[in-house]
Amino acid sequence: MSRNDTDAWVERLVRADVRATAAYHVADAAGLVKLDAMENPYPLPPAVREGLVRRLGSAELNRYPDPQARALTARLRQTFGIDPRWQILLGNGSDEIIQILIAALATPGHGVLAPAPSFVMFRLIAQWLRVPFHEVALTPDFALDVPAMLEALRTHRPRVVFLACPNNPTGNLFAPEALCALIEAAEALVVIDEAYLPFASRDQADLLARYPNVLVMRTLSKLGLAGLRLGMLFGDPRWIAELDKLRLPYNIGTLNQLAAEVVLEHYPALREQTAILIAERGRLFAALGADPRLVVWPSEANFLLIRLRSAGARAIHERMRERGVLVKCLDGSHPLLAGCLRLTVGTPGENTRMLQALDAALAG
């Protein structure tokens, strides 16, 4: 084999399962109304931007960042009212935290369990780390199938169970009694993923005091800081101490730490934006629910899931794109999502344009 024969070297050295996997796809949204990724559509207020300029301009970038991000952690604890009993672990987005959790706990014989459909990274990261991933379909109304989940716990004996609440891409909160039934039956760490908490009517943090096998994961991405890639996990310090051993040193850069601190000093402004998005979610739900061509489900997140009753979802997705609006097509990703599109809640103007594009696409 020639040393210049790169294809042969790649085929010989790169794992076969990696070569067989497609990279995570992010759609090109240039020139489009971007309503496919559950981002906050509003820019930071001027006062926040001015604060960022002042604080970041004095950053000592010749030095490594604080490895424990102590000032930021204190600000997060204060802003979100995290009980002082619980320790916080920060990650480069929730994705890094998911990777740490699976790497620390799962084994080839005792992997990961999650309902489906749910956040795709639970499955992808388990596959990348070569541990078993088991999923249990939600019920047709997207509730947890508790008997099936209990059977999966007994059969597969996972080490980690992920429960996204609100769930992505369905937008619903799982019933408290269902969550408790699974936690009580699990011989595993149960991680409650609250990425969409800013838009939800309740959180699950009270479970930390009730159960020793629960941790809570959150992110700042949906709140308006997607560009910072900052996630957090919190719970009993004994869990966090073990998981912290797998966190890469200096995983949260100096600029990210400082920027998050500055923005969280203006947290009420972010909550004002969230309130607008929740109101817009209600407007969209009413408009979409009145259209006989669609089914729309209630949501406690910053998106709505719809099903097209007769039109092909992929064709409608493309027609909307041609009209300048990008949403997420979920058709084909899971049987329960056949014919479905996911619509991120944007600004009032963006939402009106999305409704117009959807109506025109359905009209052909």
Image: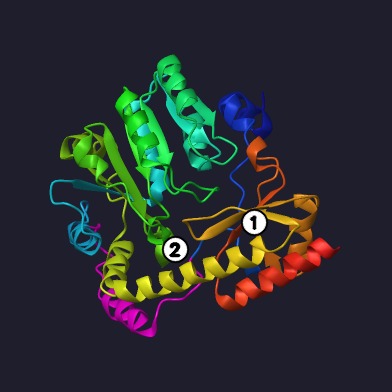
Image x and y of residue 146, in percent: 45, 29
Q: Is there any visible trace of residue 210 in the rendered image?
A: yes
Magenta stretch: includes residue 100? no
Q: Quarter of the image for the N terminus: give it.
A: top right
- Quadrant location of residue 9? top right
Is 196 on the left-hand or right-hand side of 19? Answer: left
Q: Residue furthest left?
A: 85
Instruction: Report the disc number at residue 59.
Output: none
Please tell me which of labels 2 and 1 falls first in the chain. Answer: 1
Residue located 50% across and 25% down the image:
134
Residue on which disc 1 sits: 27
- Is 154 placed above or below 200 here? above
The magenta segment: 40-65
- Is 284 placed above or below 240 here? below
Is 203 on the left-hand or right-hand side of 354? Answer: left
- The image's colour scheme reads rainbow
Residue on which disc 2 sits: 227
Give the Cα distance between marks 2 and 1: 16 Å
| Closer to us: 284 or 271 | 284
Callout 2 environment at 10 Å: few (<14), some (14 to 19), or many (20+)? few
Amino acid type, residue under disc 1 in the picture:
Ala
Residue located 71% across and 56% down the image:
294
Image x and y of residue 31, in percent: 67, 72
Magenta stretch: includes residue 57? yes
Image x and y of residue 156, in percent: 44, 17
Q: Are marks 2 and 1 in contact (CB under 8 Å)?
A: no
